[in-house]
Amino acid sequence: MKDEGPQHQGASAQLESERLVGYLVEAVRSSAKYRQVCAEAVRNVGERELAGHRNLKEAIKATKNRLHQVGAAYLPARMRYGQWLEGLRHAARSSESDLRAGCLRIMGHHASTRERLPILERFYLTTLREIGPVHSVLDVACGFNPLAIPWMGLPPEAAYFAYDMYEDLTAFVGSFLTLVERPGKAEARDVLYGLPSEAADLAYLLKAIPCLEQLDKGAGPRLLETIRAQHLLVSFPVASLGGKDRHMVANYEARFRELVGGKGWAVQRFAFESELAFLVSK
Ligand SMILES: C[S@@+](CC[C@H](N)C(=O)[O-])C[C@H]1O[C@@H](n2cnc3c(N)ncnc32)[C@H](O)[C@@H]1O
């Protein structure tokens, strides 16, 4: 009889779990709604859900639910990236104000960026007023925030590095960076595990912590500690996607204070009508 010692059993359990994760990733990405979520993010969410559910079917469903909460819920059912890019190219040839109008229209399609539109003119000017010239920016879980570059007052040579879990969104953002001749890049990745290696003067972590902490409770402290930036602009929503919540601001502020407590970092607070922001300077 073959000797199936603990080592052999461990290896075959490992193979079986690899097979299940592979199957889950394929199943989730076969649906139109999640096809554009990078495989790395689906795998990371899926592995956790497989560990917490009785069977593969439940784990697939739970993975889709999570990906909905942290991403798809912010986006319309159909993204028109090709059409939007064409419109932006046309606008850029016309005038700066046409380009800005085009960016505003597109930002309106991402629920998180849409909430910022009424305060856009003030948001970056106010929060970044006291920091020196910014030569490089990291935008972590960026959504459509890079389309606000024309409002950020960055020097033309400042490089912009943007990351989100969606492949089509980051390809679109990358084309936008090229269009506006902004050095840098946009990449699809799971920012919980593949943190940007670039160092930067400024990092945006806009309305990202509540989202990422739904995937991993330790995300907030880890990101604040390890993102290699001198200044971090961290923000929180003041209303849920479904509407106002009067405890939300207090709860998020308490969570943020807990995250920065005892670190010795300088913190400035900015309360806008639709967003609560903190500038952390290390
Ligand atoms: C609340 S939105 C914030 C978007 C943007 N920062 C803003 O404030 O306009 C959260 C974004 O995080 C992205 N996201 C969620 N989980 C992610 C992950 N693990 N890795 C990379 N991006 C993620 C979603 O696709 C979504 O665009």
Image (spheres, rainbow, N blue to C red):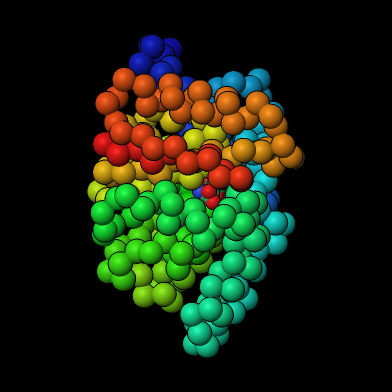
Q: Where the C terminus falls, by quadrant?
A: top left
Q: Nearer the viewer, residue 267 or 110?
A: 267
| Residue 168, percent from left and from top | 54, 61
Q: Is residue 35 visible?
A: no
Instruction: Give the side of residue 106 with respect to residue 150, left or right.
Output: right
Q: Place residue 222 in its image quadrant.
A: top left
Residue at position x 55%, y 85% in the image: 90
| Residue 81, percent from left and from top | 59, 69
Residue at the farthest bottom position: 94
Residue at position x 66%, y 38% in the image: 239
Q: Is residue 142 visible?
A: yes
Instruction: Give the side of residue 60 with respect to residue 8, left or right.
Output: right
Vertical placement of 35 versus 174: above or below? above
Residue at position x 26%, y 58% in the image: 133
Q: Nearer the viewer, residue 39 or 101?
A: 101
Residue at position x 42%, y 56% in the image: 125
Q: Where the N terminus falls, by quadrant?
A: top left
Q: State the count of labels.
A: 0
Q: Place residue 136 in its image quadrant.
A: bottom left
Instruction: Give the side of residue 279 with respect to residue 48, left or right.
Output: left
Q: Place residue 257 in its image quadrant.
A: top left
Residue at the farthest right position: 242
Instruction: Give the side of residue 242 with respect to residue 117, left or right.
Output: right
Q: Nearer the viewer, residue 24 or 248?
A: 248
